[in-house]
Image (spheres, helix red, strand yellow):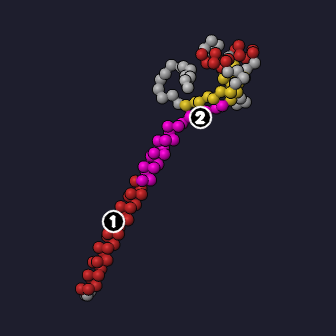
Amino acid sequence: MPDGRVLALQGAAGKCTGRRERVVRVAVAAWLTLALLFIGFSLGRASAHDETSLTAQVTSADHEQEEGYFSLGENATLVAKPGTDLFRFLTRQRGHKVKIVLQESTGPELSRLDRDRE
């Protein structure tokens, strides 16, 4: 039969181990919560900036312009219907550099040319 003192020591060690386990569990839960919050904020911020931009010089030969063909640098060609706002804008910008921003539309809209007023 075990001695009474041995049982008392085992009981004290069990209480200490239980307290340490709770502290470790709380610390792990806190770190996990912080990590999940950080990941959530990071994903939210990344999805808000889902866009790309292109800075290029607008060029077009006279016969291409008449048909609505405009080159944007070496990588892109844009076709605009003659007489539209986009066509007039690109015609005015021939020989100049422009910045084009492409991003997902948030909802159904009619096509339009937005100009930043600075």
- Residue position for label 1: 22
Q: Nearer the viewer, residue 110 or 55?
A: 55
> In this picture, which residue range is highlighted in magenta?
34-55
Residue farthest front in this picture: 118
Task: Tell me where residue 107 appears, x and y as whole percent.
Answer: 47, 26
Q: Residue at x 42, y 53 (%)?
A: 34
Circle 1 packing at 10 Å, graded few (<14), some (14-19), many (20+), is few
Q: Is residue 61 left or right of residue 41?
A: right
- Judged from the image, the secondary structure of the residue bearing numbered disc 1 is helix
Q: Nearer the viewer, residue 106 or 53?
A: 53
Q: Tell me if I can see residue 68 in this picture.
A: yes
Picture quadrant of residue 60: top right
Q: Is residue 47 left or right of residue 90?
A: left
The number of discs equals 2
Residue 47 in magenta stretch: yes
Label 1 to label 2, Cα distance in Å?
Answer: 48 Å
Task: Tell me where residue 79 appears, x and y as whole percent.
Answer: 66, 20
Q: Is residue 24 above or below residue 33?
A: below
- Residue position for label 2: 52
- Judged from the image, the secondary structure of the residue bearing numbered disc 2 is strand
Q: Is residue 15 above or below residue 118?
A: below
Task: Tell me where residue 72 appears, x and y as whole percent.
Answer: 69, 27
Q: Residue at x 35, y 65 (%)?
A: 23
Q: Amino acid at mark 2?
A: Thr
Q: Is residue 39 above or below residue 104?
A: below
Q: Tell me if I can see residue 80 in this picture.
A: no
Q: Earlier in the sequence, mark 1 or mark 2?
A: 1
Q: Is residue 108 above or below residue 49?
A: above
